[in-house]
Image (cartoon, rainbow, N blue to C red):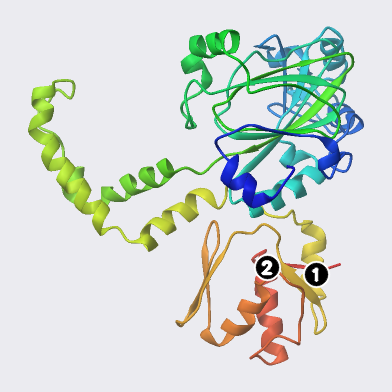
Amino acid sequence: MAGDLDEFGSTYWGSRALLSHAPDLPAPYDDLFTLTAADELLSRRGLRTPFLRIAKNGSVVGDSQFTGSGGVGADISDQVRDDKVAALFASGHTVVLQALHRTWPALVDFATQLSTDAGHPVQINAYITPPESQGFSAHYDVHDVFVLQVAGEKHWTVHEPVHVDPLRNQPWTDHSAEVAAAARDTSPVVDEVLRPGDALYVPRGFLHSAKTLGGVSAHLTVGLHTLTRYLLVQELAALAAREPALRTALPIGFDPGDPTQLAEVLPEVTELLIAQLRSTSVDDLALRLRRRTWSANRPESIPPLAHAAALTTLAPGTTVRLRGGLRHRLVLGSDPVTLQLPDRTITFPAAVGQALSQLLNGQEHKVGTLPGLPVEDQLVLVRRLLREAVLVPTS
């Protein structure tokens, strides 16, 4: 977005919508996505549901209307039929390409880097809308959205929230009447036309809708699945299950809907919960949060065949680097040294700590130049990190 990142973080993040125009941005977005890319995905990539959704005026079309078998040798019934998509698009339907952060290479890399920089999981969809059409009526999302206008023009209207900072289990349909009334009766905070290269930031909870103008319009929605303070509450409550007294059964015949009966047990439960919260360590909480959040975005893609080949040709002088977007934490100062990864923890002898720390600093390193280890041991260390997909060879 336009302006200083610190200013965006303090002034807009999670609280205010922001429209930025192409001259103030590194636009256009042709290096990320184009209408030609959309056509390729829809016609030549064997796309399947749920990677495609089609809608018109807020109503989502059933999958059977645009999917079918792939034919001989690919008899899978939910593959996207390009001819059916073409017919629906020609009749005014919006095409939604979902999870492009997993299916389109440029956006796979973009999402990996953005998630690393922002610290929040990222998803990317594309919305392609025919002229004078609207895919979805006013609604809110439960994640923050950056809209990147790729092609054509689209009129966006954004209103203040009716439910501030919604959680993942608090969709706009829970407040559909208030959403419709606010969109109809209140003044928008954004009422503008986005053109190619423009960008719009919409915090979660803000109501928004968009309508295509004269020609075909396409935009990317880059969604940040915001990690919230409530996430910490959820994990703290889960840790409280370690207390045996909190796992005991309530009395036979207990009616949880009776305030009188509830009042008899709630004080004790509250005290036990508070005691557990106070005794929980930051390390305990961090371990649970790593397991829950570090795998939300996949790290840099690895070409399996080339990666396997790199293991067989590893030699002094081979250059390697940390796999992009891989969440990790190295714990030094003990024997063994531990490397915490999204799905596992691996250990190493303390003697490799200095070399391991250097390998994980994000820079490129040549085998044979790592500190504190003879070349033979450097090869052993790097080979293991390649096998664990922690390091990747540079080209």
Indicate the position of residue 381 as horizontal and vertical percent values. Answer: 65, 79
Q: Is residue 96 left or right of residue 294?
A: right
Indicate the position of residue 66 as horizontal and vertical percent values. Answer: 77, 16
Indicate the position of residue 197 as horizontal and vertical percent values. Answer: 84, 35
Indicate the position of residue 330 as horizontal and vertical percent values. Answer: 54, 71
Residue 258: name its quadrant: top left
Q: CA distance from mark 1 to mark 2?
A: 10 Å
**Element carrying mark 1:** helix
Specify the amino acid type for callout 2: Arg
Q: Which residue is mark 2?
A: 387
Residue under the point 52% across and 61% down: 344
Q: Which residue is mark 1?
A: 310
Q: Is residue 68 visible?
A: no
Specify the amino acid type for callout 1: Ala
Residue under the point 89% across and 39% down: 30
Q: Are marks 1 and 2 in contact (CB under 8 Å)?
A: no
Q: Is residue 10 left or right of residue 317?
A: left
**Element carrying mark 2:** helix
Q: Is residue 270 left or right of residue 295?
A: left
* Screen quadrant of the N terminus: top right
How crowded pointer 2 is (Cα within 10 Å; few <14, some 14-19, many 20+) is rated as some
